[in-house]
Image (spheres, helix red, strand yellow):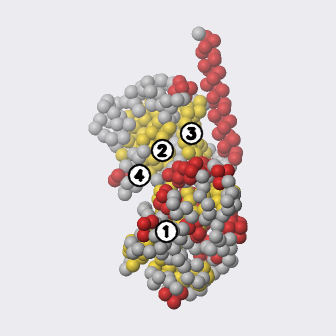
């Protein structure tokens, strides 16, 4: 028996050492700052209660949460929000009280009347023992349970102090309980939010949970991994891919690689990029169909939250792939017609779906044209001039497609004197596909158009938004084009 106890203790200590070693490696790689106390040990300064009416007070250097009858889940929330961090804390919980630690969580007036929602690191003293699993409070439910992680389930100590280490860096979250690895989640639904201490609703009043030693180490997020796909196109992909790559790298946000398909008539079965390692895929491709396995992998990547930028002629690709056409929203050429879906127009201040029969995709000769912002409050377009002159380019018109979950950010008038349609054609728009975000820019054509400041800024912002759901590249440069004059670099 003694030998078994010593073996168990050695395993716990080994897990603790490995967990801390992994945390040190992650912190070193991501440039962690010095840890700070979230709780001063005396007051609840810096915290605010949301949700139910459970009681929170300070006692013996601990935050104590106590159940109250007839009240929903209660949350003591940090006033500050955090994105990338390593959080260490201790807790001791009554055996009958479920609880949890909220991370990257939100309380928004337009979401279920302010209900707290977001990632929760579970505290589960029941026989199920899923403590340190990851639950999505108020949204999707369980994301990572511990049914297949027996060491983590056994690591919980009933009626004793337990230690959590929680890492949230980039789109990856990891947890340890008493040094034993518990849960790993890759998800980008909420990249930033408050931290909160939950007291679950209970049928019994007076049950308590205690927290102490709450220390948070801010971490600079690793660069986002972007993949540009090229290799076949009726446009000069060899000229545009280097420019697209350079513009992403200039933001300081992205680490960029390129996946080039086999050439025309090549063995497409050999093209198998690992989309799961990316936060962003930039499509600079218009050629032969990918293999069914690669199509399935790409579709899964986007549905599960992957970001995509559709660059110019990539909206000509894959006319017979239904999911792709839904992902890009609108496409052209390749035999597309009214059966592919409507055209999208902007008339009299609103988006109109035009089901007029006819082929999808056309453009007149290259020329300068005005881009008009239609969604000035979207993160991609916020703060940009309402109208700006784009450099000489193709103005794609009569694009057709499913147009599901599509938001028109900007349009351009296709003037009849330039062989245009006489319509305000969408040139910048977004699409939601599952949990994935897609930014579609019809601008670009060749390397020369990539010098357009309007293209540069909207492409960089659109890439960040697609990858993360937010835009930190908010500065509008002094050389941004005006309604009277285009601008290039």
- Residue positioned most to the bottom: 417
Lateral position of residue 454 relative to residue 123, left or right: right
Closer to the N terminus: mark 1 or mark 2? Answer: 2
Please identify the quadrant where the N terminus is shown. Answer: top right
Q: Nearer the viewer, mark 1 or mark 4?
A: 1
Whole-angstrom CA distance, mark 1 to mark 4, is 44 Å
Q: Is residue 151 above or below residue 171?
A: above
Residue at 64% across / 59% down in the picture? 229
Q: Is residue 488 above or below residue 417?
A: above
Closer to the N terminus: mark 1 or mark 4? Answer: 4
Which numbered marker is on residue 457?
Answer: none
Local SS, label 3: strand
Closer to the N terminus: mark 2 or mark 4? Answer: 4
User: Is residue 269 or residue 482 the one in the foreground?
Assistant: 269
Closer to the N terminus: mark 3 or mark 1? Answer: 3
Q: Crowdedness of circle 2 by 10 Å Cα count: few (<14), some, many (20+)?
A: many
Residue behind mark 1: 336
Residue behind mark 2: 119
User: Is residue 280 or residue 100 the one in the foreground?
Assistant: 280
Lateral position of residue 125 relative to residue 85, left or right: left
Residue behind mark 3: 184
Residue 404, percent from left and from top? 42, 62
Residue behind mark 4: 107
């Amino acid at each position: 028996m003694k030998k078994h106890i010593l073996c168990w203790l050695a395993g716990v200590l080994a897990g603790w050492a490995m967990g801390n070693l992994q945390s040190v490696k992650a912190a070193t790689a991501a440039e962690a700052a010095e840890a700070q106390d979230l709780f001063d040990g005396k007051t609840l300064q810096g915290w605010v209660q949301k949700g139910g009416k459970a009681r929170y007070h300070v006692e013996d250097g601990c935050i104590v949460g106590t159940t109250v009858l007839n009240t929903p889940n209660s949350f003591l929330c940090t006033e500050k929000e955090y994105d990338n961090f390593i959080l260490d804390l201790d807790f001791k919980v009554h055996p009958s009280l479920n609880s949890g630690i909220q991370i990257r969580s939100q309380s928004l007036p337009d979401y279920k009347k302010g209900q707290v929602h977001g990632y929760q690191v579970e505290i589960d003293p029941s026989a199920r023992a899923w403590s340190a699993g990851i639950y999505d409070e108020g949204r999707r439910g369980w994301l990572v349970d511990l049914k297949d992680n027996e060491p983590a389930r056994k690591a919980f100590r009933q009626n004793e102090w337990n230690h959590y280490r929680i890492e949230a860096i980039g789109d990856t979250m990891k947890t340890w309980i008493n040094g034993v690895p518990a849960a790993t989640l890759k998800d980008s639904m909420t990249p930033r939010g408050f931290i909160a201490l939950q007291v679950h609703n209970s049928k019994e009043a007076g049950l308590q949970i205690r927290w102490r030693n709450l220390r948070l180490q801010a971490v600079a997020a690793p660069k986002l991994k972007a993949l540009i796909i090229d290799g076949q196109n009726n446009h000069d992909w060899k000229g545009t891919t280097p420019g697209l790559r350079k513009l992403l790298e200039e933001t300081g946000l992205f680490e960029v690689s390129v996946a080039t398909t086999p050439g025309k008539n090549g063995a497409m079965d050999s093209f198998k990029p690992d989309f799961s390692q990316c936060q962003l895929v930039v499509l600079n491709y218009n050629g032969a169909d990918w293999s069914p396995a690669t199509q399935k992998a790409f579709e899964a990547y986007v549905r599960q939250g992957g970001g995509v930028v559709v660059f110019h002629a990539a909206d000509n690709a894959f006319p017979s792939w239904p999911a792709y056409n839904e992902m890009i929203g609108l496409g052209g050429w390749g035999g597309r017609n009214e059966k592919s879906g409507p055209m999208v127009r902007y008339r009299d201040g609103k988006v109109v779906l035009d089901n007029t029969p006819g082929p999808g995709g056309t453009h007149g000769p290259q020329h300068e044209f005005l881009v008009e912002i239609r969604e000035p409050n979207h993160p991609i377009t916020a703060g940009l001039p309402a109208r700006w002159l784009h450099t000489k380019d193709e103005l794609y018109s009569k694009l057709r497609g499913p147009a599901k979950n599509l938001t028109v950010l900007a349009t351009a008038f296709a003037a009849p004197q330039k062989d245009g349609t006489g319509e305000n054609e969408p040139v910048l728009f977004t699409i939601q596909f599952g949990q994935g975000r897609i930014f579609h820019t019809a601008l670009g054509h060749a390397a020369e158009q990539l010098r357009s400041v309007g293209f540069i800024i909207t492409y960089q912002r659109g890439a960040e938004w697609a990858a993360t759901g937010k835009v930190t590249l908010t500065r509008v440069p002094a050389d941004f084009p005006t309604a009277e004059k285009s601008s290039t670099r």
